Image (tube, rainbow, N blue to C red):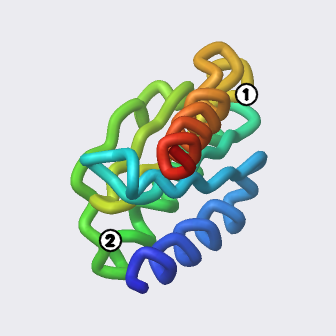
Amino acid sequence: MQDNTKVKAILEWLAEKKAENIKVYDVHKTSGYTDIIVVCEGTADVHNKAIANHLIDEAKASKFRVLSKEGVDNGQWVLIDVGDIIVHIFLPQVREHYKIDDLFAQVRNHHDQEEQA
């Protein structure tokens, strides 16, 4: 599966820049715009910028299409769209404020409930 190869590469690149609290959410059954969402955090805005720029550079070097990038300049919440994978890089307090992990847990639980019905 191409996604699996991409996800492994992205996780490796995030680890190379010491991204923390990395979570992977499979949303292919509930999302019309992407298959996988990766959420992680850095320790400061400068760290997030370094993570994001490394990910973008490595993705381009690996011939992954980077469709969009948002928030790289301020580094508080960075979104990188690699087509079938979206990567969110947060400051810990911003991640907690938006409760993004709770949102994806709810999406997953809602989908699981629909499958059981």
Most extreme residue toward the top, as rendered?
Answer: 97
Quadrant of the rendering where the N terminus is positioned: bottom left
Label 1: few (<14), some (14–19) or many (≥20) C-alpha neighbours in 10 Å: some
**Residue 116 versus residue 84 in the image, above or below:** above
Which quarter of the picture shows residue 85? bottom left
Query: Where in the figure is residue 12, as x and y percent of width and height?
Result: 64, 72
**Residue 16 versus residue 91 in the image, above or below:** below
Q: Amino acid at mark 2?
A: Lys
Q: Give the mark nearest the N terminus, 1 or 2.
A: 2
Which quarter of the picture shows residue 66? bottom left
**Residue 112 versus residue 1 in the image, above or below:** above
Q: Amino acid at mark 1?
A: Pro
Pick the front one: 56 or 92: 92
* Residue underneath mark 2: 60
Most extreme residue toward the front, as rendered?
Answer: 117
* Residue underneath mark 1: 92
